[in-house]
Amino acid sequence: MDTDDEEFLKTCPEDVCAKDFEKMVEQMEKESENRVISLLDAKQLFRDVDHNTLTQIYDYWLNKRLTLKIPLLPEIKTGSKDLLPTDPYSALIPLLPYSAVDTT
């Protein structure tokens, strides 16, 4: 949570604590992995949250995400799955020097 989030929380109803806000933002981010969720999707995720409060938090989250142009949660990037061998025994095959490979 950054200072913008803290300032925003001051405008939210008192029943929304920082911990709840962070959980909501985290859940919306996770659900937006492939595409940004809609307000309707958020309403389905947070059925117990007041409509006006949810709309306010959703709008804040969406505007911040669109302004920054990146997801708000850090991601750990791993190597491309395309580079991994598909044959589990490929590690057992010794590498041949380039000159030993027949290119004809």
Image (cartoon, helix red, strand yellow):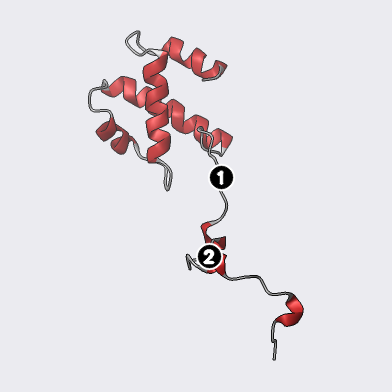
Q: CA distance from mark 2 to mark 1?
A: 19 Å
Question: Which quarter of the figure has residue 21?
Answer: top left
| Residue to which mark 2 is pinned | 85
Residue occupying the point 69% across, 86% down: 102
Q: Position of residue 71 (x, y in %)?
A: 51, 37
Contact between labelled residues 1 and 2, with CB atoms less than 8 Å apart: no
Work out whether mark 2 precedes mark 1 in sequence or the reverse, and give the earlier one: 1
Q: Residue furthest bottom?
A: 104
Circle 2 — which element?
A: loop
| Residue to which mark 1 is pinned | 77
**In this rendering, is residue 34 above or below 46?**
below
Q: Position of residue 10 (x, y in %)?
A: 45, 10
**In this rendering, is residue 72 above or below 87?**
above
Discs 2/1, front: 2
- Viewer-closest of 50 and 86: 86
Residue occupying the point 38% across, 12% down: 17
Q: Position of residue 91 (x, y in %)?
A: 56, 64
Circle 1 — which element?
A: loop
Q: As shown in the figure, which amino acid type bears the numbered disc 1? A: Lys
Q: Position of residue 94 (x, y in %)?
A: 63, 70
